[in-house]
Image (tube, rainbow, N blue to C red):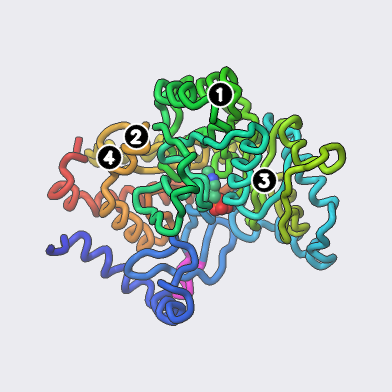
Amino acid sequence: MSVHPVAAKIVDEYRENYPASRERHQRLVNYIPGGATRSLSYFKPWPIHIDYGKGAHVYTHEGHKLLDVTNAYGALVHGHGDPDVVAAVQAGIARGSQYSTPTDGQYHLAKLLCDRVPGFDKVRFLNSGTEATMFALRTARAITGKDKIVKMAGGFHGTHDCVAASTKKNVITAGIPAGMTEDMLEVPFNDPDALEKMVTRHAADLAAVIMEPFLGAGGVVLPEPGFVQKARDITTAHGVLLIFDEIFSFRVDIGGCQNRYGVIPDLTTVGKVVGGGLPIGVLGGKAEFMNIYCHENTEKPLYHSGTFNGYETVMQAGFAAMSKFDAQAVAAINAKGDNFQEGLLARIAANGLNIQSNQIGSLVNMHFVNQPTTRAEHVLASEEELHTLMHLSLLNKKIFNIPRGLFILSTVITDDEMAMFLEKIDDTLKELLPLIREKYSHLLL
Ligand SMILES: Cc1ncc(COP(=O)(O)O)c(C=O)c1O
């Protein structure tokens, strides 16, 4: 198939712009298969290699200064090298980082989270979001003595066996034994009737419903009015636990999305921003459930251990980052997202396009789809070639962005930088227009 001139130009420019990344890629493939240690960080023709980051920017080995709208897939909320986080890490690590005992750092971060998140009476610390959701499911199963779990189609909960199999159209499920997923049931997000039917039918064997308050990695698909409350009501009615996975959504409110929506789950997982950019996962919930881990007055507490759990430096970094992510900071970053969304929708319309942008707070996801994206399957219909080209084109314009049209903002990006970013998207849409007119005319107004 011949390559469209628009596509050829964008890829050629990328090749010219990132030669030092190419060199590093060629050297790395000798030691890391495919030259990337995270599936998401690989893309063709080769991924960019970053030298360092500062504030709202990253710097490549070519010497390019890129505006960062990835923020480590949401793990960074104050940008790179936040002075308070750096000071906390430097002071902390110099005094020793790990003792395998309870520490003050654990106390401070646990208290901060329990004070803020309505669903947190108590928490346990882990090392990644994946680990946190794995233990959330285990906790629910241990509490209820039941095995089945309902999740949402398009919901992402990390990469452990129970949840990885159904998340995305391109996830390879090889290596996941059938037994790990036979108790996993799935309903479409935003389908209250399907959820009700599923929970009612399986109530006797159902330990929990796990869901993100909105689909995050699944496309920033927001819940329709009443859907999240419905999940709470139906699980309560049937004695099934409700787990909110707020690993991605936590940043939209000081107390997570549950605070924003006013719906309180039984168990909650958080991660990403909560570690101040260092690896973390947190499982928390109501005391009556979390006390299953209590060594003091439970005869056989649920076993939960890990070499790096509650790593002191992570606790200190997380506490520094979260202390300054106060109500004012949350309101300010969310306002940036709101303004950007307004500008973006105006640019999309002005270019004669019928495509989507979903947004909540500092998270924005564009979709090359001509109908509102309220379900996972709508997002999956988004035109991949256009995502690939938009990603490369924005990199050519010195915007460090995530390939699937997801933009994640930080507290340190300025209004001028946001305006410039919008201009670059506008330029990219104009660049893509000849291709869209020829090949994707269903995306025209
Ligand atoms: C909602 C949600 N759950 C779980 C995870 C997995 O977290 P981690 O990558 O820290 O394992 C992610 C990561 O993107 C996520 O967005």
Look at the numbered discs 2 and 3 and tell me whether their residues touch, using CB distance below 8 Å: no
Amino acid carrying mark 3 in the image? Val
Residue at mark 1:
235
Whether 282 is drawn above or below 234: the answer is below
Q: Give the Cα distance between marks 4 and 2.
A: 8 Å
Q: Is residue 164 above or below residue 37?
A: above
Alpha carbon distance from label 1 to label 3:
23 Å
Badge 2 or badge 3: first in the primary sequence: 3
Please name the residue shown 47% across and 75% down the image: 32
Please state, as top left, top right, bottom left or bottom right, where the N terminus lies in the image.
Answer: bottom left
The answer for how far apart the CA atoms under marks 2 and 3 are is: 30 Å
The Cα atoms of the two marked residues, 4 and 1, are separated by 33 Å
Q: Residue at x 66, y 38 (%)?
A: 142
Query: Which-is-in-front pick, marks 4 and 3?
Result: 3
Where residue 395 sits, quadrant-wise, is bottom left
Which contiguous range is marked in magenta? 59-65
Asked if the residues shown at circle 4 and circle 2 are in contact, with their CB atoms under 8 angstroms apart, the answer is yes
User: What residue is drawn where x is 50% and y is 69%?
Assistant: 50
Q: x, y percentage for residue 347?
A: 32, 40
Residue 112 visible to an observer of this rendering:
yes
N-terminal of the pair, mark 4 or mark 3, is 3
Q: Quadrant of the C terminus?
A: top left
* Percent position of residue 276, x then y: 66, 53
Residue 349 horizontal/vertical position (percent): 27, 36
Is disc 4 surrounded by few (<14), some (14 to 19) or many (20+) residues within 10 Å?
A: many
SS at circle 2: loop
Closer to the observer: label 1 or label 2? 1
Find disc 3 in the rendering and name its residue.
282
Mark found first going from the N terminus, 1 or 3: 1
- Residue 373 tag number: 2
Place of residue 414 in the rendered image (x, y in percent of width and height, measured from the top left): 54, 48
- Foreground of the two, 196 or 62: 196
